Image (tube, rainbow, N blue to C red):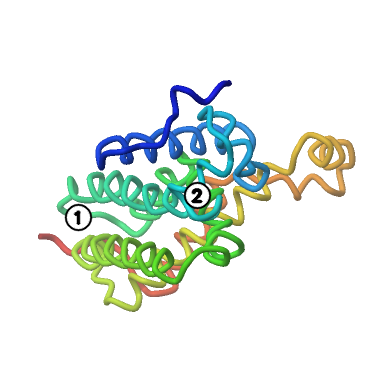
């Protein structure tokens, strides 16, 4: 693409539109290729910009994807809390199923959850990390409120539940998407079949076991 349509933004509105276009391009590429394989050059090309021009809006590719991770936290939290919020009571199995189902339905978010601590937080400014962490802390607090209402979990138990769910969702997604060559290997040898996992059922089992371990059973009624 040529760059004339992407001259440098002069107003705050134009800058916001440019940043949104960059995030949209990164989101699309991440869904198709996987976050790890998307470069800054790829994103710039998709938007029709030179890489040097894109750097006026985001400091690194990691900052772009960290912003998308924060977006993912907000969207997942809203969906999860909407489901839990409709319930006056719930069993631990029901809550585990909602966590597993809403996370498994968001494959790119699962990918980002794995990449954030490994890569995305390591090549951005301290302020970018601070901003991201404040988003996650707010959403964890909101989700924790629902866990306390329905299951009687205290703050630390709620944090552990959310951390277990999100970290495991990221790891399981990576295992579930090994790439065509590795998948062919795993499927061709019965001894390696366990290497390909399904995210939702395994995540559901682990979260259910965690809640059972806490002695959580039926919900407290509101």
Q: Which residue is mark 2?
A: 65
Q: Residue at x 87, y 40 (%)?
A: 185
Question: Real-space Cα distance between discs 1 and 2?
Answer: 36 Å
Q: Quadrant of the C terminus?
A: bottom left
Q: Nearer the viewer, residue 75 or 203?
A: 75
Residue 33: image location, x then y, percent:
64, 35
Give the mark, 1 or 2, whose residue is nearer the N terminus: 2
Examine the rendered structure and indicate whether residue 126 appears above or below residue 96: below
Residues tagged 1 and 2 counted as in contact (Cβ below 8 A): no
Q: Which residue is mark 1?
A: 89
Of residues 92 and 14, the one nearer the viewer is 14
The foreground one among 24 and 31 is 24
Q: Look at the numbered disc 2 and give the secondary structure of its residue.
A: helix
The picture places residue 192, in percent across and down from the top left corner, at 84, 48
> Please, what secondary structure does the residue beneath circle 1 have?
loop
Furthest-left residue in view?
222
Q: Residues within 10 Å of mark 1 (few under 14, many from 20)?
A: some
Q: Residue at x 48, y 23 (%)?
A: 4
């Amino acid at each position: 693409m040529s760059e004339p349509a992407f001259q440098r933004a002069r107003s705050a509105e134009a800058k916001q539109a440019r940043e949104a276009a960059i995030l949209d391009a990164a989101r699309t590429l991440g869904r198709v290729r996987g976050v790890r394989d998307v470069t800054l050059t790829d994103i710039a090309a998709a938007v029709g910009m030179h890489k040097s021009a894109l750097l006026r809006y985001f400091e690194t590719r990691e900052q772009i994807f960290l912003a998308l991770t924060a977006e993912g936290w907000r969207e997942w939290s809203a969906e999860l809390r909407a489901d839990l919020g409709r319930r006056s009571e719930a069993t631990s199995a029901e809550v585990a199923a909602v966590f597993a189902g809403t996370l498994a339905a968001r494959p790119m978010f699962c990918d980002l959850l794995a990449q954030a601590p490994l890569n995305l937080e390591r090549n951005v400014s301290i302020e970018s990390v601070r901003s991201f962490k404040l988003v996650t802390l707010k959403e964890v607090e909101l989700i924790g409120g629902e866990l306390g209402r329905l299951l009687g979990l205290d703050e630390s138990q709620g944090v552990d539940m959310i951390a277990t769910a999100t970290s495991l969702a990221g790891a399981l997604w990576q295992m579930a998407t090994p790439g065509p060559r590795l998948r062919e290997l795993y499927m061709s040898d019965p001894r390696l079949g366990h290497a390909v996992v399904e995210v939702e059922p395994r995540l559901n089992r682990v979260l259910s076991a965690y809640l059972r371990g806490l002695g959580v059973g039926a919900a407290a009624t509101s």
